[in-house]
Amino acid sequence: VVTRAAIAGTRNRMDLGEGLREDFPILDQRVHGDRALVYLDNAATSQKPRLVLDAMDEYYREYNANVHRGVHALSARATEEYEEARAKVARFINAESPREIVFTRNASEAINLVAYSWALNALKEGDEVVLTVAEHHSNIVPWQLIAQRTGAILKHVELNASQELDLNQFEDLIGPRTKLVAVGHVSNVLGCVNPIGDIVKLARKHNAKVMLDACQSVPHMPFDVQALGVDFAVCSGHKMCAPTGIGFLWGKYATLDRELTPFMGGGEMIADVFLDHSTYANPPGKFEAGTPSICEAIGLGAACDYLSSIGMEAIADFEHEMGTYLYNQVASIEGVAIYGPKPNEVQARASLAAFNVEGIHATDISMVLDQYGIAIRSGHHCTQPLHTHLGISASARASLYLYNTKDEVDLFVEKLKEAIAFFR
């Protein structure tokens, strides 16, 4: 495992990215001929360090085999590494046991697992699910499908004047019919870090469960699932230096064991199979039908190693400084509106800026910046209801991660100004 703690501890906070760039080979390239790549689309997906790439390459080169099924040497090693990856994820989020970690393809599948294995059985007509207008589509659509099948009612918390979730509305909407509160930890557009502790307290007054979409928090800050007190948490690996095709659901073991039915049927998730019925494995196996994404899980474990070697406190401090700098630089440009709370108005804000330029479509801005080698995102960022609530159809978004630098932010702002001038 590469150790980067010295870099994190001895350099200026905003220099951390410069010290880590060599770990990410994809960043050392030019696009559109001679433009150095400036990757500012990290809220969509992160790049992968050599440690992760090497771990995945090693699996296929040295011990490619199926897990849990063989007694030969390759299968034994593959099983050991796969289950150790589960243990690494458990330690990374401070789960009580690796048995509380269910590997999925991504966070979307993890949310759907909760929806179909728990909610479909638990919700009755007239029961209520509290969501927010700021949710990713993955935390909206599954609940719409479940509501259509059960007769449950969906309620939505809106924003306050600072464009944060309105905690007073949570208090108004969570009531005796509430069975679930499903909420994102950090908004991928507004950048606000939501008050999960307060939301959990409100839910507990009515014995409602809380499911946390942690895709924008686990990669960027210390994350302690026990301290948060939620019932379920989901995350995608690809946003935290791991490959695509792997994510996880965390759930309290007693809940996974007693309240969730199997999500998919097949091999691995069974105890015994008879012609007329089957019995099922204990969690997490009960929810992992078929051959899993072995290599991807090992890559996720390596990503946990990599991030832990730097320290999540150091990453959070770095991103706070860089995110504040990004926000202030973009906000200083005439005609630019940034969405979400200002950094000086909140204790924490994600290191991203979703914005629009008066009179210029977000996609036009993104396309011009791409010609300079600068990758940002434009569109609705899988949050159409939020954009509708804000009165816009799209926005541009620059989002940072641990390998970005102040120079990259400066270049982005410089070229953004030039793009605006071009359209003016």
Image (cartoon, grey):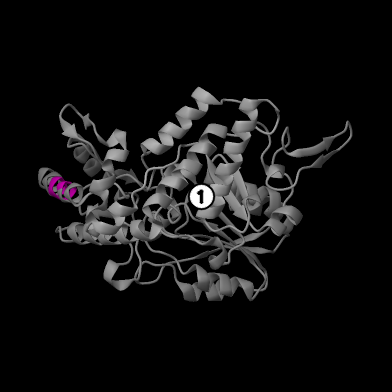
Q: Quadrant of the N terminus?
A: top left
Say whether residue 322 is visible: no
Q: Where is 249 relative to 65, above or below?
A: below
Q: Is residue 85 left or right of residue 352?
A: right
The image quarter in which residue 273 lies: top right
User: Which residue is at 45% across, 71% downward?
Assistant: 166
| Figure check: 75 above or below 187 | above
- In the rendered structure, does residue 20 fall within the stretch colored magenta? no
Residue found at x 60% / y 32%? 77
| Count of numbered circles on the image | 1
Camera-side residue of 215 and 177: 215
Percent position of residue 132, x then y: 49, 62
Task: Give the residue at x 66% y 50%.
Answer: 99
Q: Is residue 71 left or right of residue 91?
A: right
Percent coordinates x, y for residue 202 in the rendering: 57, 74
Q: Position of residue 51 (x, y in %)?
A: 40, 38
Res. 274 image quadrant: top right
Name the one closer to the observer, 310 or 28.
310
Q: Which residues are magenta?
A: 411-416
Check the image and report above or below for 164 versus 152: below
Q: Amino acid at mark 1?
A: Cys
Residue in the image at 61% along x and 37% along y: 80
On the image, numbered disc 1 is attached to which residue? 235
